[in-house]
Amino acid sequence: MTPWILFRYFIRCFFRRFAMIFMVAGAMITFSDFAEMLRRGASKNVDILDLLKISLMRVPHLMDQLLPFIVLFTTIFTFWHLKRKNEIDVIQSTGVSYLQLLLPLLASGLFMGGVNIVFLNPGVAKLTKLAKNLENKLLFQNQGNLAVTNEGIWIRESKLNGITFFHMDKLNVSQNSGSHIKIYELGPDFQLRKEIHGKTFKTQKGGVVINDVTLIQNNKVLYKKSLRYKTHISIEVLSQNFQPPDTVSFQEIPRTIKTLSRAGFSTKGYVMNWHIHLTQFLWFVSMIIFGAAGVLKTLPRHGSIMLVVMSVGISLVLFLVRDISYAMGEAEKISPFVAAWAPACISGMFGMSAFLHFEEK
């Protein structure tokens, strides 16, 4: 058996089981998420088809989070299947080491990571954004729309008697203040009724206090030292409802970070998400090594129950460690770089240590 034939055979076995586990996990995630959406939409009088649409658009993002653990399960069951049929023993009798057995799967993991980031991630981010927008529209009270551009920040607030647009050059989120604000009031007929310009402003409960005001209304221009404008929008609310990092694709994150930094928003969540995408390569490799180390030496050929228990146990521990690290990064307890890379590196080191230990025996 030539190395190339062996390489192709292992890749075929790996992707066949990956497809089966991926479809099973996808079906379970879809049903559970749809059940949760039904529960949340029960008191909102939302059409069931809209809830199904939200769930289907959320599933790619949820599956993307579970991909490393799907790779782990795939590796475990691939090697268990080969070991149960004595194929690994036959291959090893030809002088092939455990490390050489892993090479096709490691190449597959790197390939999957590249395809996911370059081709799949933009579509997943777009679907996640559409799902969140539809969810906010149907299940939550929509208090306003926010857009951050190179020219500043635009906010749209819908009212019973018209629409109000806010434009600000820069925000200071920590002090609930900003500079150079412009307010445009439009009536139900979309005609401009009032225009307000101010040099600085500070948000308060139920409104915003504007300093050095220029008021334009009914073709008259008035100047005021300060003015309190009533609005339900605040910097705190906008920060909480701003475009989440998981709705921005990997390729767009650097530009988004630059724009948000100029506007005065915190970008740590986006920086961490960028590192999380990069660690996906290491996660895939770590899960393949971890899965192989757990099967090649520790399981009997027919230890199906032990296999399932081990797979679930390892997945839960790694999932918990990863979520704790990410939560600490989001809470700014540790740096985004450490929060993203530490779980993947720790998993990789433990997996490689276990694998090298078995290789020496």
Image: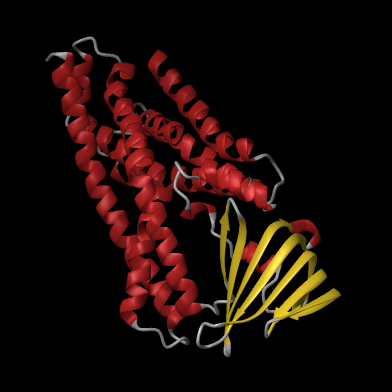
- At 46% from the left and 66% from the top, the residue drawn is 132
- At 27% from the left and 49% from the top, the residue drawn is 21
| Image x and y of residue 223, in percent | 82, 75
Furthest residue toward top? 95
| Image x and y of residue 38, in percent | 40, 78
Q: Quadrant of the C terminus?
A: top left
Confirm whether residue 326 shows in the render. no
Q: 310 and 51: which one is in front? A: 51
Q: 166 and 92: which one is in front? A: 166
Above or below, 187 relative to 107: below
| Image x and y of residue 126, in percent | 39, 56
Q: Is residue 25 left or right of residue 87?
A: right
| Image x and y of residue 20, in percent | 22, 48
- At 51% from the left and 82% from the top, the residue drawn is 190
Above or below, 4 relative to 284: above
Quarter where residue 315 is shown: top left
**Across the whole image, how many numbered discs are drawn on residues?**
0
Q: Is residue 346 left or right of residue 288?
A: right
Confirm whether residue 85 shows in the render. yes
Q: Is residue 183 left or right of residue 120?
A: right
